[in-house]
Image (cartoon, grey):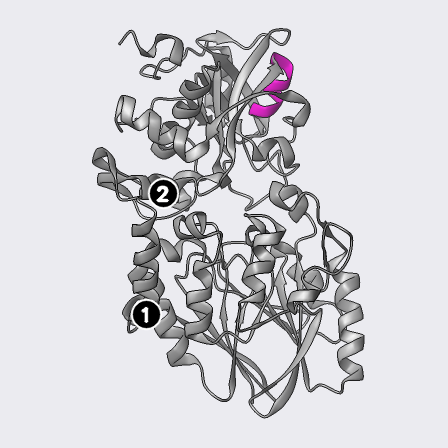
Amino acid sequence: MPRFVHYSDIENVYDGPERAGRLAGLVTELDGPDAAVVGSGDDTAPCVAAAVSAGRQALDLYRAIDTDVETFGNHDFDFGPEATRDVVADSPQTWVSANVRDEDGEPFGAAEGVVPWTVERVGGERVGFFGVTDPATDSLNPMAADMTFTDPYAAARDCVAALRGEGVDRIVAVSHLGGGDDDLARVDGVDLVLGGHVHSERTDYVDGVLCTRPGVNGHAVLEVTLDDDGARVERHSPADAPVNESVADALRERIAAAGLDEVVGRVDEPIARTEAAIHGGECRIGNLVADAYRWGADADVGLQNAGGLRLGHDLAEEVTLADLLSVLPFEEPVVEAELTGAELLDAFRQLTATAVDFGEDHWWHGHVSGAAVVWDDERGDLLSATVDGDPVDPDRLYTVATPEYLLHSDHEFPSIDERHRAGEHGIQHEVLAAYVREFGIDPRIEGRIRRVDGADSERVAAESTTAPEGVPPSSGSAGEE
C-alpha cells in the first residue's frame, strides 16, 4: 500500500528559516519505508535565499528530507539552465522530466541524471513516476526562453507506454501543469496526479483519478495513500512540527552572509501581501512598487503585474533589504516601455482575469502609478482611464515603467512586448529599495483602481475621472520636495 508525501511550490518558505525547518521536520515525520517523498516543482525559487544562492539553498532541504522524486516548475529555471543543472547534479533525488528540452533541443539535464520516468519501490509496490512541466514556461520565465517545452500529454502517453512495459503496479504523474492536470488525469493508465503550479490547494477526482495540489509557500503537505479501495488524502500543516535545526541554521547563514539585514525603512501600519490584497484590486504593496518603478524610470506610468508580487509576511515595523527582496525576488530589471495611448488602453483592459486567460478567474492582474482606471466588473469593460489627470490620448506616446518579464510573457499584459523596450533602470528590488530610502514607506489606497458594477457603471461612465491625490512625483521633481 504505497504512500506519497507531496509538497510543491514551496517558494518563499526559505525566507523564514524556522518555517523551512518545520517543513523539513514535518516531511521527515510523515516519511517511512512505505512512502515516497515527492515534489512537483517551484521548490527552488523564487525567494530571498534563492536570489543569493541561485537556488542552491534547496539542497539543504532536499538532503534533510531525503526527497525521492522531483520535477521542474517554471521558477526552477529562474537563474538559467546552467544553474538548474548544477542543482540537479548535487540533489539526492531523481528528477523526472518528460517534456523539457535544453538549448540544443535535447532532453534537459540528461548528463546530470534527469530522466523522463523512473520506477521506485513504494509500500511494497513498483510505482512508475514521470514528470511534466507547463509548456508555456519559456514564455512565463525569460531565463528559460532558449529552452523548449513540448506537448506534456504526448510525453505522458509515451511514459505510460514505457512504464507499462516495465510492468509497474501504479503510474504517478508528477505535474507542474496547474489547470492542465485535468487532461493529464484523462491520459489512459495514469493512477494519480501529484500537481502544482496553481497556488490554491486541491484534492479532487477527474474521471476517477485523484489530483492533488498542496498550495504555496509550504503551508501544507499532503499525505496520499493508494490501496485497492482507491485513494485517501490527509492534509498536514507544518505549523506545530519540530524544527530541523540544520535546515534552519543553513538558511540563516546564507541570508546573513548576503548582508540583507540592512534596515531601509519603517512601516507604521502593516502592509499585507496576501492573495486577497494583491489580486483583489488596488492595494498598498502594489501602489508602493508601481510608484517606485515610475520614479526610478521617470516614466509617465508605473505598472506592476500582480503575479510578480510574491505572497508572504506583512511588511511591518523595521523593513530590511531582505523584506523588499522577498516582495520582488527576481534578478530582472525595471524596463521603460513606450506605448501609444491606444496600446496603453489595451494594457489597462488586461488588468483583469476577464481579459487575460491566466491564473484564477477572480484575479486582478495589475497595479498602477501615475494613472487611474475605472473598471465595470459586471460588463467586463474599461469605463475610463487617465494619466496625470488627463484622459488617455490614443495617439500620444506614453512611457511605462514595468518588469522586464512583461516584454516576454504572453500571459499577462500581452499588449506589451519586446518591440516596446526603450531602456532599463536597475534591478526591480534595488529600484524599490532606492525609492524607500528616498521617500519612506507609507503607501495608501487612493482610488487609482475603481471597480464598479450595475447602476454605478452608467454614473461613473459619465464622470470625468481625475488623477488620485498623493501619487509620488517622477524623478524629475523628486529632488524639489
Q: Residues within 10 Å of mark 2 (few under 14, many from 20)?
A: many
| Residue at 51 percent of width and 31 percent of height | 333
Q: Is residue 285 magenta?
A: no
Is residue 141 in sight in this rendering?
A: no
Cβ atoms at labels 2 and 1 below 8 Å apart? no
Q: Quadrant of residue 319?
A: top left
Looking at numbered disc 2 in the image, what kind of residue is underneath it?
Arg
Q: Is residue 342 magenta?
A: yes
Which mark sits nearer the N-terminus, 2 or 1?
1
Q: Which residue is mark 2?
A: 273
- Quarter of the N terminus within the rendering: bottom right
Q: Which residue is mark 1?
A: 246
Position of residue 455 relative to residue 320, above or below, is above
* Dot 2: element: loop
- Quarter of the C terminus within the rendering: top left
Q: Quadrant of residue 292?
A: top left
Question: Which contiguous range is marked in magenta?
Answer: 341-348
Q: Main secondary structure of the magenta part?
A: helix
| Residue at 35 percent of width and 53 percent of height | 15
- Horizontal side of residue 67 vs 311, given as left or right: right
| Residue at 77 percent of width and 51 percent of height | 104
Image location (x, y in percent) of residue 365: 52, 35
Image location (x, y in percent) of residue 121: 61, 87
Image location (x, y in percent) of residue 299: 48, 15
Looking at numbered disc 1 in the image, what kind of residue is underneath it?
Ser
Is residue 102 in sight in this rendering?
A: yes
| Residue at 70 percent of width and 59 percent of height | 108
- Label 2, label 1: how far apart the Cα atoms are: 28 Å
